[in-house]
Amino acid sequence: MTTNQIPATQNEAWGFWGTMNEQAAAAWPLAMIAISDATGQPLESVRTFLDSRHGRHFADDVQNGLHQGQSLQDAINAATQRWMGWTIGRQTSKQYGIPRGLPYLTGFVIHSEICEEMAA
């Protein structure tokens, strides 16, 4: 995926970018590639996820890793692995319409893309 052009955020004030503050410019391409590689979803879908409120929560997880002394790349990789290890449960499936048992990260990347398409 690294050969593709990384889409720019469309939400600098909020989402992943806004939560990452001064580290946003360095973190953005690392997170885009890590999430796209892990989920198999296109970079545009990952951008939509990172610009959403779910992207803010993902950034919170990355920030936790940074506060524990991890490098930016390691914190992003750890958050990506953690979110891929969780699965969509019954309540989340009911609330968001994401199929039960899907990896959490994959489910919310796809969910974000569907929401953006429906809003267009």
Image (cartoon, rainbow, N blue to C red):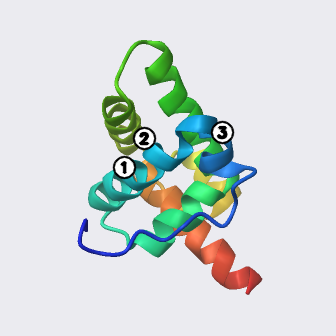
**Label ID, residue 30:** 1
Locate residue 42, reporting x and y percent.
38, 73
State whether residue 99 appears in this view: no
Asked which quadrant contains residue 48, the reply is: bottom right
Three-letter amino acid code at disc 1?
A: Leu
Asked which quadrant contains residue 43, the reply is: bottom left
**At x 69% / y 55%, what residue is drawn?**
12
Q: Earlier in the sequence, mark 1 or mark 2?
A: 1
Q: Earlier in the sequence, mark 1 or mark 3?
A: 3
To which residue does mark 3 refer?
19
Q: CA distance from mark 1 to mark 2?
A: 16 Å
Q: CA distance from mark 2 to mark 3?
A: 17 Å
Q: Nearer the viewer, mark 1 or mark 2?
A: 1
Q: Earlier in the sequence, mark 2 or mark 3?
A: 3
Which residue is situated farthest in the top direction here? 68
Locate residue 56, reporting x and y percent.
64, 44
Locate residue 25, reporting x and y percent.
51, 49
Three-letter amino acid code at disc 2?
A: Trp
**Label ID, residue 83:** 2
Q: Secondary structure at mark 3?
A: helix
16, above or below 86, in the image: below
Q: CA distance from mark 1 to mark 3?
A: 15 Å
